[in-house]
Amino acid sequence: MNVEILALCDFAQDAMGKLHITGAFDAITVRDFPSVHPLMCVAARIRFQIYELGSHAIKLELADGSGGRLAPALDGSMNVDGIGGDSACANLALNIVNLRIDRVGSWRLVLSIDGQERASVPLYIRKAGASPSSA
């Protein structure tokens, strides 16, 4: 399998096999702490080879380097069916609503499939007016 896309964004939608992504980002800047980010979406497109079709365990975590979580981990499963050809894609479009942010820091969104980390992207939390090196 190959993770073709993993992104944090303002909007994501799977519409009949097409993954729509708007406003991909890797940083959130807030004025004060604590803060609430009203809506953040996770978009992923995963290509499976024909021999990998079937059910797969999926886990998404938003954690810092010491294992602290910005949000609870999401565990689920997906069933991948082929429609012909030598591979098939599965799209994920998930909403994270009212994410509480308590401090500046560096986080990683990690996508694990069947217990193995397959992709990650950074998320930087910054305070408005602060220099990036002080974060």
Image (spheres, grey):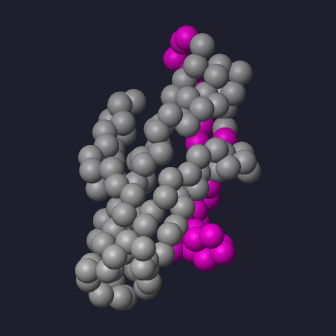
- Image quadrant where residue 17 sits: top left
Residue 53 spot, x, y in % from top left: 65, 27
The image shows residue 33, relative to residue 49, as above or below, that is below
- Image quadrant where residue 14 sits: top left
Task: Find the residue positioned furthest to the bottom.
Answer: 33
Residue 121 spot, x, y in % from top left: 50, 53
Question: What's the residue at 55%, 11% (across, down)?
Answer: 85
Q: Quadrant of the N terminus?
A: top right
Q: How many marks?
A: 0
The image shows residue 63, relative to residue 43, as above or below, that is below
Please tell me which residue lies in front, 88 or 132. 132
**Residue 135 at least partly seen:** yes
Question: What's the residue at 54%, 61% (across, down)?
Answer: 108
Task: Find the residue positioned furthest to the top.
Answer: 85
The image shows residue 65, relative to residue 115, as above or below, that is below
The magenta stretch spans which residues? 56-85
Magenta stretch contains residue 45: no
Secondary structure mostly seen in magenta is strand
Question: What's the residue at 33%, 35% (across, down)?
Answer: 15
Question: What's the residue at 64%, 44% (across, down)?
Answer: 118
Q: Quadrant of the C terminus?
A: bottom left
Q: Does 68 sit left or right of 15 as displayed?
A: right
